[in-house]
């Protein structure tokens, strides 16, 4: 699947002038509130018409303002999942799900129903009404309804934004399964670094109605303009060992190993590890007597001071780069310089399968 989008739209004082391409997988539109993410996905869905623009999927032109082409939303065969489930309250979960089938082409296989129910873990909910479901359960049903319409593209507009942390943790594994087991390409809108790090194959970072950068999660989340609270490195590795007794697993990186808090993995499994730069300390000698489980040896490859008396330190270990944000005073005291051997002391790690 190839998606090409270019759109210009004036909305009061806000101006959208952005474009991107997607080649399948999960493409995340990432940025702070008001950056234009939802405006862009509404244009893709056909819920809004750009003042100027073009939308093309697999060579089929859906929007071309110059040629006055605008295919209505019901003919685009796109699924849409909103922040809230928007289920029909008077219908059971089963009826909500089968409603999506009305929009599926006749060639869609009925066997997909059982597969999607199993993948989303909603078999036990089929006879219940939406009013008795948790927020996470409602969103899983909404995703199932969208998938049962057999969409050629799934649009997800901050589907976890209305959930608390416990419900987000509940639904994220199902989104990961959706990404890994379904062939449906996804455009995923989010302002959460954690969600983007865990789910995205490609990230389109937006700000003030413009595209600032595109790249992999590792490339985009390491940029200084990413959310500073969660900005950091995203590293790929392979699970080497699992220790159920202590609830941890060992992940092999390119030149180091990390211990992560999860015993639900399988040896040989590919995972991503998100390391926030604010949770990394830098030492010039190997520290002793620490509770931190992960200490990675490497070389300083870059030092990026900012205007707030802080600096971002790039520490290269094999093919991986770990980021640390420390004060310039610490840079001077440690006499940090390019090529200097250091140890990255990592306090917290977020794991993604």
Image (cartoon, rainbow, N blue to C red):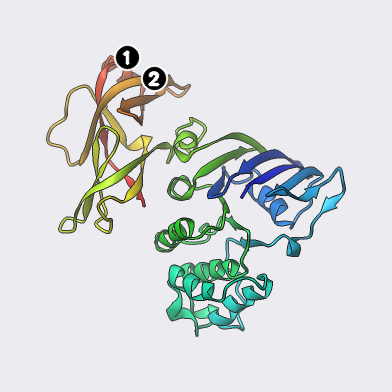
| Count of marks placed on residues | 2
**Mark toward the start of the polypeptide (2 vs 1):** 2
**Residue reaching furthest front?**
107
Helix, strand or loop at mark 2: strand
Foreground residue, 91 or 163?
91
Judging by the rendered image, the residue that carries numbered circle 2 is: 303
Callout 2–callout 1 Cβ contact below 8 Å: yes
Q: Whole-percent x and y of residue 24?
A: 56, 49
Residue 281 position by quadrant: top left
As displayed, is residue 64 above or below residue 116?
Answer: above
Left or right side of 42 for 179:
left
Left or right side of 313 for 204:
right
Residue at figure coordinates x 32%, y 14% from the top left: 337
Q: Whole-percent x and y of residue 298?
A: 27, 25
**Residue reaching furthest left?**
289
Helix, strand or loop at mark 1: loop
Gap between marks 2 and 1 measured at Cα: 8 Å
Foreground residue, 19 or 327?
19
Residue at figure coordinates x 22%, y 22% from the top left: 284
Residue at figure coordinates x 25%, y 52% from the top left: 267
Q: Whole-percent x and y of residue 14?
A: 73, 42
Viewer can see residue 190: no
Mark 1 surroundings within 10 Å by alpha-carbon count, few (fewer than 14), some (14 through 19), many (20 or more): some
Q: Whole-percent x and y of residue 283?
A: 23, 25
Mark 2 surroundings within 10 Å by alpha-carbon count, few (fewer than 14), some (14 through 19), many (20 or more): some
Kindly identify which numbered label has been placed on residue 337. Answer: 1
As displayed, is residue 285 above or below residue 280?
Answer: above
Residue at figure coordinates x 56%, y 47% from the top left: 27
Viewer can see residue 304: yes
């Amino acid at each position: 699947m190839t998606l090409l989008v270019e759109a210009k739209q004036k909305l009061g004082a806000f101006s959208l002038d952005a474009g991107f391409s997607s080649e399948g997988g999960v493409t995340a539109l990432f940025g702070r509130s008001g950056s234009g993410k939802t405006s862009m996905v509404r244009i893709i869905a056909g819920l809004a018409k750009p003042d100027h623009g073009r939308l093309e999927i697999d060579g089929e032109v859906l929007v071309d303002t110059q040629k006055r082409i605008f295919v209505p939303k019901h003919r685009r065969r796109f699924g849409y999942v909103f922040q809230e489930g928007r289920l029909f309250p008077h219908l059971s979960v089963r009826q909500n799900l089968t409603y999506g089938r009305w929009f599926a082409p006749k060639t869609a296989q009925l066997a997909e129903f059982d597969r999607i129910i199993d993948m989303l873990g909603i078999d036990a909910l089929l006879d219940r009404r939406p009013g008795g479901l948790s927020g996470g359960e409602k969103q899983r049903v909404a995703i199932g309804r969208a998938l049962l319409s057999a969409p050629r593209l799934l649009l997800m507009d901050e589907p976890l934004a209305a959930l608390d942390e416990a419900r987000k943790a509940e639904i994220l594994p199902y989104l990961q399964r959706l990404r890994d087991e379904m062939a449906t390409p996804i455009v995923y809108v989010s302002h959460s670094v954690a969600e983007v790090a865990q789910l995205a194959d490609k990230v389109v970072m937006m700000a003030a109605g413009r595209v600032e950068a595109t790249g992999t999660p590792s490339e985009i989340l390491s940029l200084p303009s990413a959310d500073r609270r969660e900005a950091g490195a995203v590293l790929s590795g392979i699970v080497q060992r699992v220790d159920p007794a202590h609830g941890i697993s060992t992940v092999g990186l390119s030149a180091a190993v990390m211990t992560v808090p999860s015993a639900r993995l399988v040896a040989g499994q590919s995972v991503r590890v998100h390391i926030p730069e604010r949770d990394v300390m830098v030492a010039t000698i190997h520290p002793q007597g620490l509770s931190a489980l992960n200490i990675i040896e490497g070389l300083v490859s870059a030092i990026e001071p900012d205007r707030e008396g802080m600096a971002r330190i790039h520490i290269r270990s094999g093919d991986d780069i770990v980021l640390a944000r420390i004060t310039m005073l610490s840079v001077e005291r440690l006499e940090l310089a390019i090529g200097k051997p250091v140890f990255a002391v990592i306090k917290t790690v977020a794991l993604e399968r």
